[in-house]
Amino acid sequence: MEIEQYLTPAKIEEQEYAPFVWGSNLKRNTKEGFPDLDGVKVAIIGVGEERNSVDNKGCAKAPDRVRESFYSLSYINSLTVADIGNIIPGHTAKDTYSALEFVCAELLERKIVPVIIGGSQDLTYANYIAYQRSMQTVNIVCVDRKIDLGDMEDEISSDSYLSKIVQYQPSLLFNYSQVGYQTHFVNQQEIETLKKMFFDLYRLGQIQTSLEEAEPIVRNADILSFDISAIRRSDAPGTFNSTPNGLYGEEACQIFRYAGMSDKLSSIGIYEVNPEHDDRGQTVQLAAQMIWYFLDGFTARKNDYPSTTDKDYMKYRVTMKEATHEIVFYKSLKTDRWWMEVPYRVGLKSKFERHHMVPCSYEDYQMACAEEMPDRWWQAYQKLS
C-alpha cells in the first residue's frame, strides 16, 4: 500500500520562486505526480484536521498558509526535503488519525523525518501510534502552556490526547516531558499524576531562565509536539488560545533548532495555528520560521550518541557519598554535549537500551559533584530499575 493514496497536493497559488528559496528546491506532491522519496531526509505533511479541537476551529486551514510562508524562506544547501502534501480528511477524525499513522510509519521505516503541520494537537496521538510498527519505546516532549491530560474517560480531543497515549496498549511510552507549562492553567492533580509516573515537568520560568537547559530535554525526544499557544500572544496571536505570557518567538525557533540537531528525534509536529485569528499572517510566518530552524539544526547533526568504547568522549565518574550510586558522565569531544549513564535491570536490554544514556548538561555534572542527585538521572533510574 503506497502512502500517496492518503495524500493530496497542497492548495496554494502557483508562482515563480527565486532559485535560492525552498519553493524552488523542494520535491513536491503536485497534480503532475507524487515525488520520488529516494534521498529525502525530511518530509512535510499537512493535516487539516480540527474536529476534535477545543475552542480553536479554523486551525484546519493552517497547513497551506504555513507552506506559503515557508516556501519563500531561503533554501538550506545539501538537505533534500519533500513536501508530500496534505492528508486527505477521513470520514471521521479517527480515520484521519489512521491515515496519518500509516504515512508516518512508512516514512519512519524509510528513515525520513515527518514534519507535521496541523491541525489540532490531538494529532500527536496518531504520530505516537505510528511507532507501534517497530515496537520501539519512545520519548515525547510536548511544548504547551498547559497539560493536555484530561480525564481518562474523556473522548480524545486536543485537551485530552495525552491520557489516550498513556493508556494505549501495548505501551510504547518510556518518558514524557512537558516544557513551558504555566501553572495558572494547570490542574495540580495533573501535575501529581505525571510526577507519579516519573515524567518530567518544566515550568515556563525554568525554561526562560536558562533556555540552554531545554537542549538536553529536546535531545532526549523521539517526538516533539508543539502547541503554538505556548508562545505569547504578542508574538503568535494566530490561535484562539493565545495568552499574554509564554515563550518568545526566537525561543520557539531555538527549541526547534535543538530538535533538528538531535540525532534521536525522528518526528515533529506544530499544531493549533489558526489563520482566522492571525494578525497579518504573523503566526503563520513564525511557524514557517520554526520549521526553517528545525531544518537548519538538522544539517548540524553530528551522530555523537556516546558509546562506551568511543574515543570521541571524555568519561567522568562521580561517586555520591550519601547514596549507593556512581554516576558516569560522557562529554562529546565533537559537540561538548553531555550524557549520563543510567543502569537498567538485566533482561531489559533489548527494550530499554536506547534509553539508558540520558542527555544532560554540564550543570547536571556540577550538581553530582556537589553531592546533589540530578533529577534527570533519578527519573530515568526509577523507570529503568
Image (spheres, rainbow, N blue to C red):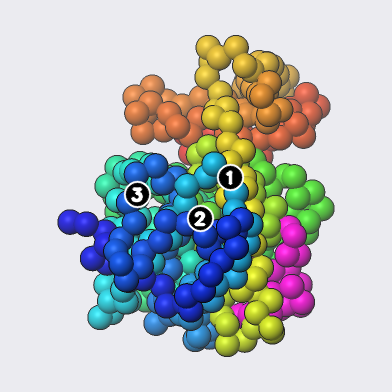
Q: Is residue 143 above or below residue 58?
A: above
Distance of label 3 from label 1 (alpha carbons): 18 Å
| Residue 194 in sight here | no
Binning the other alpha carbons within 10 Å of mark 1 as few (below 14), some (14 to 19) or many (20 upward) gives few
Q: Is residue 260 above or below residue 59?
A: above
Give residue 200's position: percent from left, percent from top: 60, 50
What amino acid type should be assigned to the residue bearing mark 2? Answer: Asn
Q: Please tell me which of labels 2 and 3 falls first in the chain.
A: 2
Furthest toward the left, the residue is: 1
Left or right, 126 with reference to 95: right
Residue in front for this viewpoint, 29 or 306: 29
Is residue 295 rendered magenta in the image? no
Q: Please tell me which of labels 3 and 1 falls first in the chain.
A: 3
Residue in front for this viewpoint, 255 or 164: 255
Labelled pair 2, 1 in contact (Cβ < 8 Å): no
Distance of label 2 from label 1 (alpha carbons): 9 Å
Labelled pair 3, 1 in contact (Cβ < 8 Å): no
Foreground label between 2 and 3: 2
- Give the magenta-colored segment's residue range: 230-251
Foreground label between 3 and 1: 1
**Label 3 secondary element:** loop
On the image, numbered disc 2 is attached to which residue? 25
Give residue 112's position: percent from left, percent from top: 40, 46
On the image, numbered disc 1 is attached to which residue? 77
**Label 2 secondary element:** loop
Task: Please tell me which residue is depicted at 71% across the width and 35% down the height of the picture.
Answer: 361
Residue in front for this viewpoint, 44 or 28: 28
On the image, numbered disc 3 is attached to which residue? 37
